[in-house]
Image (cartoon, rainbow, N blue to C red):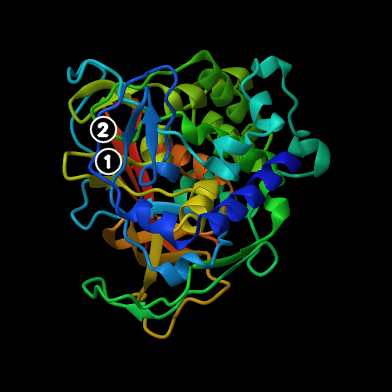
Amino acid sequence: MEGLVKGLEGVALDDAVEGAEARRDRRAGAALVDGDGEDRARSTWAEVASEEKRGGQERRWESVEHDRKQQQRIPAPTQWHNQDEGGEMMDGGSDGTTGIGNSGPRLQTSQCGTERQHSEEWKGYKRLPSEQEYSEDVSHIHHGLNVEPTREELDNLSKACARLWELDLNRLTPGKDYTIECGEGKKVYHKDDKASENLFSWLEDSVLRRPTYSRFCALLDNYNPHQGYKESVTQQDKHEEAAFIEEISRSAPIKYLHRYLVMKEAMSQDYEDFKKVLTSLWFDLCGRGGCSSSSSAFEHVFVGEIKGQKQEIMMVLLTNMQFYLEESNGNVDYQGYIFPRRRGELPDSETQLLTIQFEWHGVLKSVSSTLIGVSPEFEIALYTLCFFAGGEDNHVDIGPYSVNIKCYRLGDNKIGSAFPIAEN
């Protein structure tokens, strides 16, 4: 992962050289232009607002940020989750839905070190999963680690989710792995900016070398965020997906998830079959927004989607390294936290669940919940557990936080959306 870290350092240097004039050009970008090139295109939010070039065509769209905040270039990874005030998180579509018949362009991404500085490690993730190297199984590292659910946990989803939090051995530690600046609080309906700085001010470099974070990041360029376009999935994309599942399957949260579902008679005892179920659940394509094969659970929950000519943000889920890039590139303008429901419990630099307000590419999100520093394997396990063992509303405790894990379905066997809402 040394190449990945060097890539990120290169991005910061490149941005500094660009200067204010280049950033103004990006913010003042022209209207979206349809592009082509299914096979060559790549997408994530990392450059939706900056540049899309495919087949000689260019796409830009306006973004508005504070110039001063853009000088603060060192954010940290986080899990972002959209909270729709109206409640409904997805619309329309199924595998049989008809819609736009062609796959739209994927956008060039600057994910975790940028395509410009694509590391050898990242290229290696595109090889056959059987040819790749993975982390040592957690049971070989932490001898005696217990991932068996108790009877109490099997009877109480909240206790099971709390156990997942305890088993997230890869979670980042505030002050050690990153630093956040919460700014000032506000009500949801207040639109003024209450944060003078970025939310994240520092990230420990070693975080970028952690295998599950790195492999998660490698997936983010596999999608077209614009709703209504069929996704074009290459064989290399499938290799990255299978390798990601293989990597996280060696972690404690995923092992606990498997044992829990087996004991609830919701999953095969065969671990290889379980990994295939995870791959299918999160990466199989489904229809959304009037177009078949245009989305997946992973894209909708962890990457995000835009719908409509007015660029309405359907989901804003700037996750892990993706958020690192979005804030470092000036695409996110953090505007303060939303006052907690309980008076006197204000967030600080140690808080790992925040309800916040921010502007993203010039579009205001009045309220959004974020889990800060949790690992990719934890969130995959958390939402999968709620999908199989819970309902649409899952009022649970994770660590010191009370949350409602919203879990919407598409049909009977697909995740439509999943995200936390802080209840403290």
> Which of the two discs, 2 and 1, labels the residue nearer the N terminus?
2
Q: What is the three-letter code of the residue carrying label 1?
A: Ile
Looking at the picture, tell me which residue is in the foreground, 223 or 269: 223
Q: Residue, x 53% and y 64% (percent of image)?
A: 352
Q: Position of residue 45 (x, y in %)?
A: 41, 43
Q: Is residue 335 left or right of residue 151?
A: left
Establish if 138 lies above or below 331.
above
| Residue marked by disc 1 | 306
Quadrant including the N terminus: top right
Residue 66 position by quadrant: bottom left
Disc 2 to disc 1, how far (Cα)?
Answer: 6 Å
Establish if 365 lies above or below 220.
below
Residue positioned most to the front: 21
Question: Which label sits on residue 29?
Answer: none
Establish if 384 lies above or below 325.
above
Contact, mark 2 vs mark 1 (Cβ under 8 Å): yes
Q: Is residue 118 left or right of residue 229?
A: right
| Residue marked by disc 2 | 227
Q: What is the three-letter code of the residue carrying label 2?
A: Gln
Looking at the picture, tell me which residue is in the foreground, 81 or 8: 8
Quadrant including the C terminus: bottom left
Q: Residue, x 25% and y 33% (percent of image)?
A: 33
Q: Is residue 396 visible?
A: no
The crowding category of the residue bearing disc 2, from other C-alpha atoms within 10 Å (few below 14, some 14 to 19, many at least 20), is many
Q: Residue, x 68% and y 39% (percent of image)?
A: 211
Q: Position of residue 137 (x, y in %)?
A: 75, 34
Q: Is residue 43 visible?
A: yes
Q: Residue, x 75% and y 34% (percent of image)?
A: 135
Q: Is residue 56 left or right of residue 102?
A: right
